[in-house]
Image: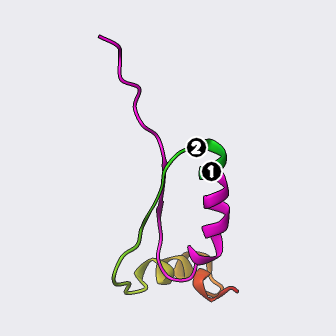
Amino acid sequence: MAAVKPSRGIVVFSGGTAANSLVDVFNDISQKQQCPLSYIIPISDNGGSSSELIRVFGGPGIGDIR
């Protein structure tokens, strides 16, 4: 029996507008690598991660830089 090669792909965990600006980049990579592309986007966001980054590093939230 032949060994089954595991399938590999790209999975993007993101939300908000950050993923929107990278959609074309990920699509290009997945086409060149001939692998599937999946997005996992939360349905809600309380801003907790951004507020922690601001607390530690200072400056504007990552989502506010456009």
Classify 34 as above or below 18: above
Task: Provide residue 29's location: percent of width, then percent of height.
Answer: 65, 52
Q: Is residue 15 left or right of residue 25?
A: left
Q: Is residue 2 left or right of residue 16?
A: left
Q: Which mark is residue 31?
A: 1
Q: Secondary structure at mark 1?
A: helix
Q: Secondary structure at mark 2?
A: loop
**Cα separation between marks 1 and 2:** 5 Å
- Where residue 41 sits, quadrant-wise, is bottom left
Q: Reply yes or no: does residue 13 show up in magenta.
A: yes
Q: Amino acid at mark 1?
A: Gln
Q: Which residues are magenta?
A: 1-29
Residue at 36%, 23% in the rendered image: 4
Q: How many tags in the picture?
A: 2
Task: Provide residue 32's location: percent of width, then percent of height.
Answer: 67, 46
Task: Provide residue 45's location: percent of width, then percent of height.
Answer: 38, 84
Classify 5 as above or below 46: above
Q: Is residue 52 left or right of residue 17?
A: left
Q: Which mark is residue 48?
A: none
The crowd level at tag 2 (other Cα within 10 Å; few <14, some 14-19, many 20+) is: few
Q: In this view of the protein, which residue sits in the foreground, 3 or 15?
A: 3
Q: Reply yes or no: does residue 28 show up in magenta.
A: yes
Q: In this view of the protein, which residue sits in the foreground, 64 or 59?
A: 64
Contact, mark 1 vs mark 2 (Cβ under 8 Å): yes
Residue at 59%, 51% in the rendered image: 30
Q: Amino acid at mark 2?
A: Gln
- Where residue 59 sits, quadrant-wise, is bottom right
Residue at image mark 2: 34
Furthest toward the left, the residue is: 1
Task: Provide residue 57's location: percent of width, then percent of height.
Answer: 61, 76
Image quadrant containing the C terminus: bottom right
